[in-house]
């Protein structure tokens, strides 16, 4: 057995020093989407969050339904949620020969994670977290990594990060938001907290939050000193984000659907539907008949036909162009954001009615509402991930003590900024 690489040696030699990273997203960072993202500049992708207890069940049903990878899927980090070290290790052992590291989800902020006792709701159980990290570090032939959220007190965040590092974590992703910052309370990601964590630890650090355009990544690295930048919504609304280009939405949608057709079991109808709603978000309000159809279609062939219909309409507007690259550069609005036609891939945000000052790009919020994209899970999966589940073997053990919130309403610096909003009503779930 070869020596297990750690820290920067792992980051450089195995992960190849990734700068552009696709976040773990339930029902969204699936195999087909990772293939597409890799083709358009992603250096590293994470799997969706996988439920360790379900994944390690003897019947293998959940694993078969949720684990797919292949030659176009490297490098790859598999993410699990868990609250039992031995169960987590058992699940991780099943994939250690097919991925480059295993990540522990310590960042999911949704209420379902509180009921199931995982994600950000383990933030107060440092001994358990340390034991899970240590167990994977000692029991796997590949490194263990972690994804966390910050505390209101930066000093506590630093102690938290150093504790995780000391337990054996070899790479840390810091989502610069509080556990309470979710849905319509998402607020701003705190790059300053990320910067201080980066300075305090000796392992590689990825930043997560506030990425709308390619240049935001360089701004984030300059502001925080991190080794790479992870994005969720930025990638979903514009899977060409890492190229710096605004492609016609149908171009990448067609390529994604072709991947789904060419690679069996690489996606699901619910995942495809969610992706198409996001990619075509800017124009669907102009084509409500097709928006309604997208909510109802139940097959890959139906999705392909729908995209062909939508493309035919959009080509009339675009003149057949497959990329928007205006001479003289992008025109911007009064807040400094690009004015883009509805037929191109672009970030999704709205102007808050109380906008008083021109925000910087670093102050822009990616949409992180779990109903639309999710670090965590879809509504269809709540019965499996919840502590209230009636499905045998599908629950995580109930919390021994009630999770304690560390903050009330997040402080968004006092001035409302332009921010993203949930589009949950336009992302139907289920197959």
Image: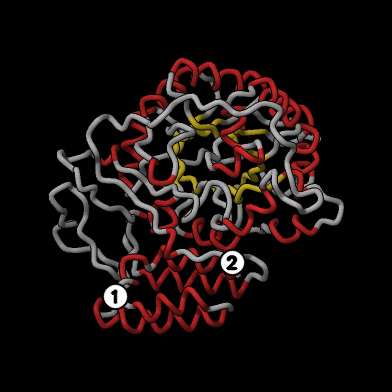
On the question of residue 402 being in view, the answer is yes
Q: Is residue 313 left or right of residue 4?
A: left
Q: Is residue 11 visible?
A: no
Tell me the residue that label 1 is attached to.
Answer: 286
Q: How is the image coloured?
A: secondary structure
Left or right side of 348 for 405: right
Horizontal relation, residue 87 to residue 253: left or right: right
Mark 2 or mark 1, which is nearer to you?
Answer: 2
Q: Name the residue beneath numbered marker 2.
A: 430
Give the residue at x 52% y 29%: 204
Question: Along the horizontal axis of the image, is 78 left or right of 350?
Answer: right
Q: Which residue is rendered at x = 49% and y = 50% of the image?
A: 370
- Where the N terminus falls, by quadrant? top right
In this rendering, the answer to whether 309 lies above or below 262 is below
State which tag comes first along the sequence, 2 or 1. 1
User: Where does residue 357 sit, x and y in percent of width and height?
Assistant: 15, 38
Above or below, 2 relative to 213: above
Query: x and y percent of residue 189 in the render?
Result: 38, 35
The numbered mark at residue 166 is: none
Q: Which quadrant would residue 363 be assigned to in this image? A: top left
Asked if the residue under mark 1 is in contact with the one under mark 2, i.e. CB atoms within 8 Å, the reply is no
* Front residue of 255 and 389: 389
Report the residue that reaches farthest toward the right. 58
At horizontal 46% and vertical 34% (from top left) the residue drawn is 180
x and y percentages locating residue 377 in the rendered image: 58, 51
Of 105 and 392, nearer the camera is: 392
- Against 431, residue 409 (above or below) is above
């Amino acid at each position: 057995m070869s020596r297990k690489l750690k820290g920067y040696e792992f980051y450089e030699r195995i992960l190849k020093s990734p700068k552009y990273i696709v976040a773990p997203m339930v029902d969204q960072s699936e195999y087909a989407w990772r293939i597409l993202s890799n083709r358009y500049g992603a250096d590293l992708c994470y799997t969706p969050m996988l439920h360790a207890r379900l994944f390690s069940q003897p019947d293998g049903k959940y694993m078969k339904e949720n684990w797919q990878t292949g030659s176009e899927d490297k490098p790859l980090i598999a993410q699990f949620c868990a609250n039992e070290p031995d169960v987590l290790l058992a699940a991780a052992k099943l994939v250690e020969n097919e991925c480059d590291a295993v990540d522990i989800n310590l960042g999911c902020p949704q209420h379902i994670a509180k009921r199931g006792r995982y994600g950000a709701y383990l933030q107060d159980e440092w001994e358990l977290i340390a034991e899970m990290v240590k167990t994977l570090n000692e029991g796997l032939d590949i490194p263990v990594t972690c994804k966390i959220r910050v505390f209101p007190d930066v000093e506590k965040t630093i102690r938290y990060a150093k504790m995780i590092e000391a337990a054996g974590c070899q790479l840390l992703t810091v989502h610069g938001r509080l556990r309470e910052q979710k849905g319509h309370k998402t607020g701003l990601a705190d790059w300053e907290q990320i910067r201080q964590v980066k300075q305090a630890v000796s392992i590689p650090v990825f930043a997560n939050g506030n990425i709308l355009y390619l240049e935001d990544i360089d701004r984030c690295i300059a502001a925080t000193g991190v080794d790479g930048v992870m994005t969720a919504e930025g990638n979903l609304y514009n899977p060409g984000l890492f190229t710096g280009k605004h492609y016609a939405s149908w171009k990448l949608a067609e390529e994604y659907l072709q991947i789904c057709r060419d690679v069996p079991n690489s996606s699901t109808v619910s995942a495809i539907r969610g992706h198409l709603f996001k990619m075509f978000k800017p124009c669907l309000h102009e084509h409500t008949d097709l928006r309604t159809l997208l909510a109802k279609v139940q097959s890959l062939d139906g999705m392909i036909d729908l995209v062909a219909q939508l493309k035919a309409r959009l080509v009339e507007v675009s003149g057949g162009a497959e990329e928007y690259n205006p001479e003289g550069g992008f025109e911007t609005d009064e807040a400094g954001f690009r004015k883009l036609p509805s037929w191109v891939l672009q970030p999704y945000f709205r102007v808050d009615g109380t906008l008083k000052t021109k925000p910087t790009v670093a102050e822009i919020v990616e949409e992180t509402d779990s109903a639309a994209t999710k670090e965590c899970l879809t509504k269809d999966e709540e019965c499996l991930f919840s502590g209230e589940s009636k499905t045998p073997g599908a629950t995580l053990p109930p919390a021994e003590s009630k999770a304690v919130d560390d903050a009330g309403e997040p402080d968004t610096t006092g001035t409302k900024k332009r921010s993203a909003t949930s589009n949950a009503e336009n992302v139907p779930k289920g197959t």
